[in-house]
Amino acid sequence: MIMPTKEKTLDDLFHETLKDIYFTEKALVKALPRMAKAADCDELREAFENHLKETEDQVDRLEQVFKLIDKPARAKTCEAIKGLTDEAKEVMKDFKGTHALDAGLLSSAQAVEHYEISRYGTLKAWASELGLDKAVRLLDATLQEEKNADRLLTEIAESQVNRRAEAA
Amino acid sequence: MIMPTKEKTLDDLFHETLKDIYFTEKALVKALPRMAKAADCDELREAFENHLKETEDQVDRLEQVFKLIDKPARAKTCEAIKGLTDEAKEVMKDFKGTHALDAGLLSSAQAVEHYEISRYGTLKAWASELGLDKAVRLLDATLQEEKNADRLLTEIAESQVNRRAEAA
């Protein structure tokens, strides 16, 4: 007997994207300590260290969302984030010991934050449409942290520019 | 005679990131017509078609920036964007003919927009630091277009949600 193929729905999209961002957060738990170690200025190193703690909480929140939809917490390889973390590794290697190192690290970190802002914004909207109110609150908590992290990185980038301008 | 290795600078970072976003825009010139063709609702199809025209102008602006720094316009493969356009292809295949197709296309498109917003923000800040005033204006023109594109996609996503809610 041939079973009809079940039409894919918004629930499937939500689940797939959840696995994607779970991969992302787990990849960042590994990448952020390396980026903190490489950072030249104290402000940037501390920002990476603090964001690592937030990222660990974000992994935990995602595991709660998997539970809410009765699915095991599983990651699905996200090529975009692999590309961005590989880029950060390349910057750490090519710009080691140069004045431009932190600018390169900031650029990679902000690209990652924007990726996350986009994904959490989408997931929050879908959770709301699917009536998953508790998931909306969990996803929104992380979304606000990612927006704050991006703002902090912009502030650090701007203060670096000012510092370099003053030193010139 | 061994020549000392020249220290890499912000000029190098600017040039590398310019090649990266040039790859991105050229990849989107190819991807957007496919996404427009796949889109289910007219609003989303038109948004993709209009953004294709903007993207062609953005390629042209990047070529002007390459000229300003006396470099040939060359693209460098960006794995992050390859990942995101591959994801869009997967969505078009897996969700073809379903009600969730446009939601998936919107998600991929917004991830791309956020990538670009991050990169143009960084490039604009660096161009300013490097005293490339004409490049600042060109990069800012594109940055504003990308922010508007992202806002429009959010509006379409919200109107879809409302439409579906009304239909329920």
Image (cartoon, coloured by chain):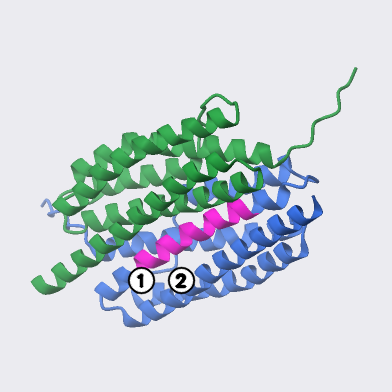
Chain colours: A blue, B green
Mark 2 neighbour density, 10 Å: few (under 14) some (14–19) many (20 or more): many
Disc 2 and disc 1 in contact, CB within 8 angstroms = yes
Q: Earlier in the sequence, mark 2 or mark 1?
A: 1
Residue B7: mark: none
**Rendered residue at 50%/53% (across/down):** B118
Q: What SS does tag 1 mark?
A: helix
Please tell me if label 2 and label 1 are on a single chain.
yes
- Rounded to the nearest angstrom, the CA distance separating label 2 from label 1 is 9 Å
Residue identified by numbered label 1: A124
Is residue A120 on the magenta stretch?
yes
- Where is B57 relative to A7, above or below? above
**Position of residue B141 measured from the top left corner of the image (x, y, whole percent):** 43, 46
Q: Is residue A5 above or below residue B10?
A: below
Residue at the limit of the structure toward the right, as seen here: B1
In the image, which residues are magenta? A106-124
Relative to residue B7, is residue A86 drawn left or right? left
Identify whether B72 is placed above or below A123: above
Q: Amino acid at mark 2?
A: Leu
Looking at the image, residue B71 sits to the left or right of residue B141; the answer is right
Question: What is the chain identity of the residue bearing mark 1?
Answer: A
Residue B10 location in percent, x, y? 69, 42
Residue B129 covered by magenta stretch: no
Instruction: For label 1, count other residues whose C-alpha is less than 10 Å away and answer few (under 14), some (14-19) or many (20+).
Output: many
Q: Residue furthest front?
A: B133
Q: Residue B146: x, y in percent?
A: 39, 51
SS of the residue at dot 2? helix
Residue at figure coordinates x 36%, y 36% from the top left = B57
Q: Which residue is mark 2?
A: A143
Q: Residue furthest top?
A: B1
Answer yes or no: is residue B168 visible: no
Residue occupying the point 33% across, 53% down:
B149
